Image (tube, helix red, strand yellow):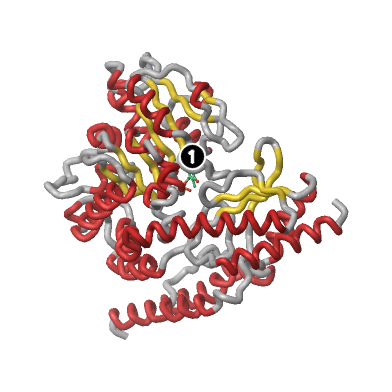
Amino acid sequence: MRRELALKEVFETARTSALAYLDTWADRRVTPTPEAIAALSQFDTALPDHTGDATAIVAELHRFGSPATVATTGGRFFGLVTGGALPATVGARWLSDTWDQCSALYRLSPINAKLEEVCERWLRDLLGLPEGTVAGFVSGSSSAILSGLAAARYRAFQNLGWDINARGFHQAPPVRIVTGRHTHSTVVKAIAMLGFGTDHIEYVDVDAQGRIVAAKVPPLDRGTILILQAGNVNSGSFDDFEPLCRRAREAGAWIHIDGAFGLWAAAAPRLRHLTKGISLAHSWSVDGHKTLNTPYDSGIVLCQDRAALVAALQATGSYITYSEQRDGMLYTPEMSRRARAIELWAALKYLGRQGVADLVEGLHDRAVQMAAELRAAGFEVLNDIVFNQVLIACGTDTITARTITEIQQSGECWAGGATWHGRPVIRVSVCSWMTTAEDVSRSVRAFAQARDIARAAGV
Ligand SMILES: *Cc1c(COP(=O)(O)O)cnc(C)c1O
């Protein structure tokens, strides 16, 4: 067979397999069946000695792989903060995967560079960020936070007359890190990776919703990095940005906002009040793969101090030829990257300003509905539903814990657990564009059934 014909056969198999997968969507369990999990042992083979049949490999992946997926792209997965994938984004991904572009430099992919530029402009516009804000397209918020804080580290040390790139931490003046007690674990990880030491974090107390208490924020200065949060990972709450950012600005401190899923509130008129004052920050991190529903993986670091971001992340080498055009690797820790701005562009182009607002407000509406129906079904709702997160508990901690297990085994829907102010809670995150009002009601019925089983078990 001619090479290109073989290629097409492989892709055709992938296409028909993907479409067959979609056909199972409506009826399938959210989690794989025990049989599907058991069948994964099919993959426990020795490394083949010889080259195989590409089409057969894709077919095998579909046969044993598709049933062992978690249906996070459907409407009844409420775990972590995952998000589904809009068809326009998956379609764009299929095509761009075929292109296999490396997005390090303009010369390697003019199309990617163009769409990064367009996304950067559109994101500034949608989120209301200052002119001159640049964007780096990374794998997720973990990486975006690391990048934003690397820029912050560079600038804060520079403010103290210290070049951290050249001189490192040995005998460096102290740069302080101030953040809320509910800061996300990936922020803490980034602080550790950047060499600050987590013991040196100045934690600020939070209120009942997980927001930083402004009165408890210590004095700030030019050598301080203040890290705020748009969307508490459990309650969905937002820090009170405007007064905090004003204070930090006056003191000359750097402000980073972790808005992994919550920053999108800025693009929704009904929820925009939650993000008032964010434009006063210096850097922001946000995901495409959560609220915006692009496929994995997609994170964005935004920074209004381009020089600091580039100084923190730039690499040089005689073979790297920067151009007059946009060279994506200037804004990211990686050199070679997949061209993930393409799906981001597809999401924004497809939804438009109104569609983004409808998507984000729709997630909020479903969360409000979920809380109301859960309350009516006798659950305790523990947080204010400001965005897409709902925290609930049953009569006792043991019944709550058992209910989570029963929900997860039901296959009807999926929710995880967390600890909220010392109490185990069921944690619901509404983040898929697919979730309908009926999905919510159906899931609430499954929650109630799971709780009844837990109660009957007498735990
Ligand atoms: C999900 C999340 C992160 C980490 O994002 P990834 O995209 O998983 O790396 C950071 N902060 C918050 C608030 C999150 O919800």
Report the amino acid beneath label 1: Phe
Name the residue at the left extreme.
Answer: 324
Q: Can residue 140 be seen here? A: no
The front one of 227 and 153 is 227
Residue at 29% over, 33% down: 312
The front one of 446 and 209 is 209
Please provide percent x and percent y for residue 421: 66, 36
- Quadrant assignment, res 67: bottom right
Q: Can residue 232 be seen here? A: yes
Please provide percent x and percent y for residue 33: 66, 70
Name the residue at the bottom extreme.
Answer: 1
The front one of 301 and 198 is 301
Residue at 37% over, 24% down: 248
Left or right, residue 166 beside residue 211: left
Q: Residues within 10 Å of mark 1 (few under 14, many from 20)?
A: many
Q: Can you say whether 45 is above or below 344 in the image?
A: below
Residue, disc 1: 238
**Tag 1 secondary structure:** loop
Q: Quadrant of the N terminus?
A: bottom left
Residue at 28% over, 24% down: 166
Please provide percent x and percent y for residue 95: 31, 70
Please provide percent x and percent y for residue 17: 47, 78
